[in-house]
Image (cartoon, rainbow, N blue to C red):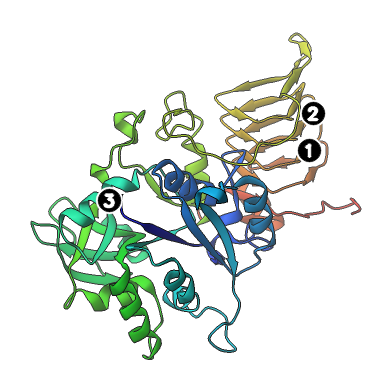
Amino acid sequence: MPNVMTMVLAGGEGKRLRPLTLDRAKPAVPFGGRYRLIDFVLSNLINSGLLKIKVLTQYKSDSLIQHLSRSWNLPAILGYYIDVVPAQMRTGREWFKGSADAIFQNIHLIENEKPDMVAIFGADHIYRMDIRQMLDFHMDNRAELTVATISVPASQSSEFGNLKADDAGRVIHYEEKPKQASPGQDGMVRASMGNFIFNTDVLLEELELDAMTDSTHDIAGDIVAGSISKRRVFAYDFKSNYVPGTSEQEMGYWKDVGTLDSYYCANMDLVSVSPVFSLYNSYWPIRSYHYQCPPAKFVFSDIKGGRVGVAYDSLVCEGAIISGGTVRSSIVSPLVRINSYSLVEESVLLEGVTIGRHCRIKKAIIDKNVNIPAGTVIGHSIAEDRARFHVSPDGVVIIPRGYLFPGKRA
C-alpha cells in the first residue's frame, strides 16, 4: 500500500441538526446508542489499514476532542496516529473559511509527513467502506484525484455535489448542490460522498492556487470542480465496494445525517429484525468508547398489573434500566432509565435520559440527561408538540439537552 495520510474534516457546525448541535460539533453527535458520528469514518479508515489520521476540528469541539482522546489511540511506536488538530489561525487572523482553507491552514502537516497520497474524508456519514478498494481504483486509473460517489434520487440533488463521468469513470462535469438536476433515465443523479483521494503534489498545488483566489474555499465546489478541465479526475462508484460480512441489502448503504429527519431515519434503520445497516458485523467492526457501566437490566414481571420491563425490536445499551416500562422500536443509550407503566416507541433516547412513570413517548429524540416528568405525553399530538418543543418537518419531536419541563428546577 502507498504511504497515505488522511485528513478528516470534523469542524462542521451542523446547523440543520440543531438543537442536537447547539453545544457540540456535528461529528460528536451520538448515534446508535453508543457511538458518535465520527466513529464510522474512523472505523472505516482503521479497518482499511489507513493509520495516519489528522482530525481537523473547529466548532464547539470540546466533547469531540474528549471522545477522541478516550476512544482512539493508535501505537505511536509503529508510526501510527490519530491526532486532533484544532483551528489555530496559522495563516492569518481568521478561522477556517471552508474545507479547502481548513486543509490549507494545516498544509504543513502534509509537508512534514510527505505522503504519496492524501485522503480527505468527512466525519458525519453512516456507512461501511473498504477504502483500499478506492485506492486501488485511483492507482489503476492513474488518477490525480478520485471522488467517491453514490447514486441518489434527483429530488435530493440540491443536497450534494452532482457529477457526470464518461464510460471509463473520468469526471467530465461537476456542479455543487445545483438547484435543478439533470438525472439519468433511472431518475437518479451521481452524487459526491464528500470523500476524496488526491495525489499529494496535485493537492498542494491546488490548495496554493485556491488560497490566492476569491473563492468559497471549498474542497468540492472549488478544487474538485476547478480540476476537471486540467487534471485526471475519476469517480469511484461506492456501490461496487465490498466489505466482508455485509448483506446484499447493505451493499452501497450510505446516509448523510445532515438533517434531523435523516438522522432519525438512520437510527431507525438499526433496529429492525433484519436491519438495512447492521452494527453486528464482526468482520468490519464499528469501534468506539466502551462505557464503564453494568449490564442493561429489565425488572418487574407483573403481567397482570401491566408492570413489565420489556423491549421489542430495540437496541438497549449498557447501564440502562427498563424498570417496569415498555420499549418498542427504539434506541436506548447507556444509563437511561424507563420507569413503570411508561411506553416508549420509535424513539432515540440519548445517554442518561430518565422517563418517569406513566409516560407515553413516540417518535422523539431526547438528548442527554433530560428528565421526563411522570405522566408526560410526547409524539401523540403534533399541534401540542409544536407548541412546546422543536418538531422536525417529518414530525419528529426533539427535546434538547438541558430542557426543563414546567415546574422542574435545574
Q: Distance between the Cα atoms at labels 1 and 3?
A: 44 Å
Q: Position of residue 120 (x, y in %)?
A: 40, 62
Residue located farthest toward the front when viewing the structure as drawn = 77
Foreground: 174 or 219?
Answer: 219
Q: Distance between the Cα atoms at labels 3 and 2?
A: 48 Å
Instruction: Give the residue at mark 3.
Output: 134
Q: Is residue 173 left or right of residue 296?
A: left
Number of marks in the image? Answer: 3
Q: Earlier in the sequence, mark 2 or mark 1?
A: 2
Verify CB contact (< 8 Å) between mark 2 and mark 1: yes
Label 2: few (<14), some or many (≥20) within 10 Å?
many
Q: For the residue marked with disc 3, what is the amino acid?
A: Met
Label 1: few (<14), some or many (≥20) within 10 Å?
many
Q: Position of residue 22 (x, y in %)?
A: 67, 63
Q: Position of residue 32 (x, y in %)?
A: 56, 39
Q: Distance between the Cα atoms at labels 2 and 1?
A: 8 Å
Q: For the residue marked with disc 1, what is the amino acid?
A: Thr
Give above or below for 109 relative to 402.
below
Label 2, secondary structure: give it: loop
Give me the disc on residue 339. Answer: 2
Instruction: Give the residue at mark 1.
Output: 354
Which of the 4 quarters of the picture holds residue 181?
A: bottom left
Give above or below for 209 relative to 354.
below
Which of the 4 quarters of the picture holds residue 114?
A: bottom left
Verify CB contact (< 8 Å) between mark 3 and mark 2: no
Give above or below for 377 relative to 24.
above
Can residue 170 be seen in the rendering of this structure?
A: yes
Label 1, secondary structure: give it: strand
Q: Is residue 88 left or right of residue 230?
A: right
Q: For the residue marked with disc 2, what is the amino acid?
A: Asn
Q: Earlier in the sequence, mark 3 or mark 2?
A: 3
Front disc: 3 or 2: 3
